[in-house]
Amino acid sequence: MGAIAAGIAMFGAAIGGGIGDGIVVAKMLEGMARQPELSRQLRTTMFIGVGLVEAMPILAFVISLLVMNK
């Protein structure tokens, strides 16, 4: 039962992380297209946002390992 729960947690985290990354990058590209002079600031902010979005699947992976070992 723990393996199924871990798999479901990782599935949700992977889907959520992929969708979140896609939205962040799409909005950054949209902002760069509108104001090319701000591309450096937008890129920096995008990397911070992607890092925060990617923290979710990493935490889900750790929790999945903990659930499987219980």
Image: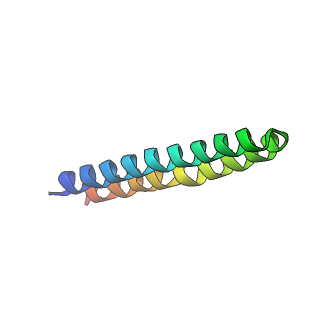
Say which of 3 and 52 sits in front.
52
Identify the image's colour scheme: rainbow, by chain, secondary structure or one colour. rainbow
**Residue at 37% of width from left, 47% of height from top?**
15
Q: Is residue 33 above or below residue 10?
A: above
**Residue at 71% of width from left, 38% of height from top?**
33
Horizontally, is 41 left or right of 25 in the view?
Answer: right
Say which of 27 and 2 sits in front.
27
Horizontally, is 20 left or right of 28 in the view?
Answer: left
Say which of 28 and 66 sits in front.
28
Provide residue 2's location: percent of width, then percent of height. Answer: 20, 57
Provide residue 11's location: percent of width, then percent of height. Answer: 30, 48
Residue sitting farthest toward the front: 34
Provide residue 14's location: percent of width, then percent of height. Answer: 38, 46
Horizontally, is 10 left or right of 36 in the view?
Answer: left
Q: Quadrant of the N terminus?
A: bottom left
**Residue at 37% of width from left, 58% of height from top?**
63
